[in-house]
Structures are given as C-alpha cells and as structure tokens.
Image (spheres, rainbow, N blue to C red):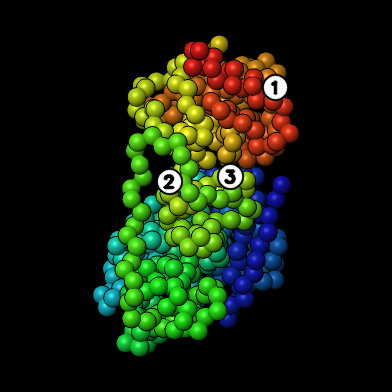
Amino acid sequence: MDLFRSYQLVETQDGYDLILYLDTGMNDVEFATEFGRMDEDNKKRLNQNIVDYIKEKFPNIKINTVKVMAGTLLLSSFLLSAPVLGHAATTPTSSITQTQSAYNYNVKISVNGSLQNYKNRPFIYNYTTYVPLYDFGKTIGASVWWNNTSNTVGINKNDTMIAFVRGSSKARVNGVQVSMPSSIVMDDVTYVPVRFVSENLGYQVNMDSATATVNITNRAVTQSNTYTVVSGDSLWRIGQKFGVSVDSLKSVNHLTSDTIYPGQKLTIPPGTTTPTPSPAPAPTTNNTQWPDVTYVVKAGDTATSIGKKFGVPASDILKYNYMEAGEWFNEGEKIAISGYAPRVYTVKAGEAAAPARKGKSVDWFLEGQYLIKRGDTFTITDVDTGRQFKVKMIGGYNHADVEPLTTADANTMKSVFGTWQWTPRAVVIYHNGMNLAASLSGMPHGVDTIENGVNGHFDLYMKNSTSHSSTTSKVYIQQHQNMVAKAAGQ
C-alpha cells in the first residue's frame, strides 16, 4: 500500500504547505503511540520517504512546510532545511520536538487580568488560539481528567463537563455532542481551543490584537443585568445560577418557549427564588425501588436533552444513574429522573486478591451493571478448565457485550469452547479485586471493534441478565442463568 493515503496542499505567499495523511493500517491513536516510540533512525527513514514522495508527486511545486498526520492527530510538523522543488530536495530537519516552526507562538493568555506563563506555550494555528489543557485548567480552578485507554480527556468546572477524544473535532458538553476546532496533541501534551473551552465554562473571551493577548474573564451579570447564553445552558440552569424562576426569566425576556441559544442576551430579573441545593450524595445503602419519575431512553437522547425534558440538570441525570461524564445512554434503557436508580451493595472492590473459579452472584440490574462498564478490561476465568483470558466490555445494558482483548486472548477463548458456539459456559469475572459469577457464550456476532482475529462480540450474562432482543429464545437465556449459578457454586 502507499505510505500516504491522502494529502492537502495549502497555498502560502511563496509556495505551499503540505499536509500528509499516513495510511497506518491501524487505529490512528495506536499508530501515534507507536510513532512516539520510534528511534531516530526510523524517523530519518520516514523523513526520506517524505522527500521521495514530494519529488514524485509534486515535481513542479515549491513545498516549504510539511505536516504529518494520523487521522486528526498531528505526529510531526517541520520546515524543510531547503524548499523542495523538483529533484532539488534535501532531507528535512525533522523531529517531533521541532513543531514550533508550524505555529505562531506570538500570543499571550490573560485570565482575569493576570498574564499566564505556561511551560508548554500557547500558540495560534488556523486562526485559532490553543492552550495546554492541564495548565489552563489549573489556572481557572477546573478539574482536568484523562483516560489513556480510550484516549479521552475532559475538563470540568461547576456544573459544566467537557469531554473529547484527543485530536478530535467533536466534544461533548454536558453530554451533548458539539463541533469544536480540533484539539492538537504534541509531545503527549493536549492543546485545546481556548475560546471554545472558556466560553463553554462560562467565561468571556476577547482578543487584543494590539498586544496579541487573549483576555479571559469571568462571565457575570453586567450593570444592565444581562447574561450571555453559552452552550449547554437552559433557563432552569440560568435561574439556578442567579436565584430566579424560569417563569420570571421568560416573562422579562418575552419568551414564549423554553428554547434559548448560545450568544443570546437575557435580562436577569431581581432574585425571586432560592437556588435548589445540589442533589444529596449517592446512597450507600441498598435501594431496590425506582424513584417516582423514570424514563426510557430514545435514540439520540443525551443527559442534557433528557434533563431539559424534565427540568433537571444534566449533572443530576448522570448522578442519579451512577454515570460519569463521557458515558452515554442506550436506546431502550430505563433511567432514573427524580432520584437514584435501584442499586444494592453486596461486593466491594479489593475484597479478592486474585482471579478464582468461583464468584459471587450479583444481580445485573441492581449491581452488576455498575461494577463493570463500557470500556472496562477484565479477566475471565473458565470454571471448568481454569483457563484465563482478557476481554473488553464494548457496550450493552441488559447484559454486557465483550470482545477478547488480543488475538492471543481470542485463541485461548476458542480453545475453551472448542468451536465457536452459542452454548454458554460458566465463568468468573475478575475486576477491581472482585470475583463475579457470570456466563459467557461462544458465538461471535454483531459489532466488532477490536483487531483480535475474531469478527464480532460475545454475550456475557450475570444473575437476571436478559437479552437485548425480545425475540431471543427463553431457553438460551435460561442456559445463561444456569451457568451463572454454577459459577457461584450453586
């Protein structure tokens, strides 16, 4: 295959910048990780390949700057030691640490009047100012988190949660997917568009072109008692912020519906209500009852859209259903709206030191679904043979959908079943120091997300798990329950 799957030429005053998109043959994030581990000899060979590619493809075009991409992830960006034109190419002076030449670093960041001095300097790229996420989060008192397994990062402040895959041009703000200028990853540092992040966290952003300074200030009610709506806002949320009722906001702003939009100016009336206190901490005692208000998720629903339907903050929707920022709902799933969903606590993390061939029987809906979640990796032990392999949970809500983590894990799993078959086996899940009784079928089907030599995923049941489809054989479901009981030693 060709080394580069596509390219883009960007015209400049004295030639072109060339953007090359590598045909990696693997997940772009995985390749970016491997690229970062390349020794200098391999990087030099890649650089020479780039020069040869330019000679072949663009013999009559003057190329000044080259950027190498894996999907939306920037791997390397550099000026050539001499412009490449025809066959007069010279080897680029390339290193991933030389990306400075591709960006404008002549920009300063001021937060509430205080100039910031970050170790990883902000820069301007494609008319967008970028700041290092972690350093910027510390400046404004926000919490920054990341998940290396899913390559996801996020920043939270007050009741606003922003999450995105590193290098992506999509983000979720309080569960709602929105577009943003692509985040950029260099030397394992994540840089984010400062205007997008700041405005969604409730700040005002202005650029002073005379001093090349981005001024970021707290957004507040001005002397004229106005407020500028930001992404993720609702009338309920604004009312809570300023201690006024939704009806008062609608009346003073002559609104005939609850619909508002980012950038809209709202007049804030004098406070008429006391803000509702934050929800109580999640219960740690057994609860088997649903709250008064529940909801069955529809396609496209998010925490924010559901919250708007019921006048409940998106953060409460997540809390009441024991979810974290970045998690999403499944169509057909029942969720809690006015209080916490049922949950019991019969096992706890760290109670088991190693995988075992007998596990505790836990109800999937009351406990199991909160112990293993989408994206988790855990060890499976076959009860009869004692053989072990690792799987990753890729989804599911009536039971867990899992895939073997590697080709070796898939081969071990197949050796346990003999041949791929629907008939389930008794297994024990070992995760976070807990051994949980379960049942695993051996027939790959449906969605496939991991390159492991098997096309499809597998059903993993716990006590009282059921099928995602109403047409699934009751015999098959009962087979799973029998194997769960066996795994629990019953």
Relative depth, front residue between 47 and 198 = 198
**What residue do we see at 30% from left, 73% from top?**
111
Q: Where is residue 146 in the image (x, y as percent from the top left)?
A: 41, 50
- Secondary-structure class at tag 2: loop
Q: Earlier in the sequence, mark 1 or mark 3?
A: 3
Q: What residue type is labelled 3?
A: Glu
Q: Which of marks 2 and 1 is nearer the N terminus?
A: 2
Q: What residue type is labelled 1?
A: Val
Provide the residue designation for mark 3: 333
Q: In this view, does 322 lie to the left or right of 57?
A: left
Instruction: Determine which of the numbered discs, if any, sits on residue 475 in the image.
Output: 1
Label 2 – label 3 distance at C-alpha: 15 Å
Q: Earlier in the sequence, mark 2 or mark 3?
A: 3
**What residue do we see at 70% from left, 67% from top?**
59
Q: Position of residue 435 (x, y in %)?
A: 44, 23
Label 1 – label 3 distance at C-alpha: 23 Å
Instruction: Determine which of the numbered discs, if any, sits on residue 340 in the image.
Output: 2
Q: Which amino acid does label 2 sit on?
A: Tyr
- Secondary-structure class at tag 3: loop
Residue 222 sits in which quadrant?
Answer: bottom left
Q: Is residue 285 visible?
A: yes
Discs 2/3, front? 2
Q: In this view, does 373 lie above or below 485?
A: below
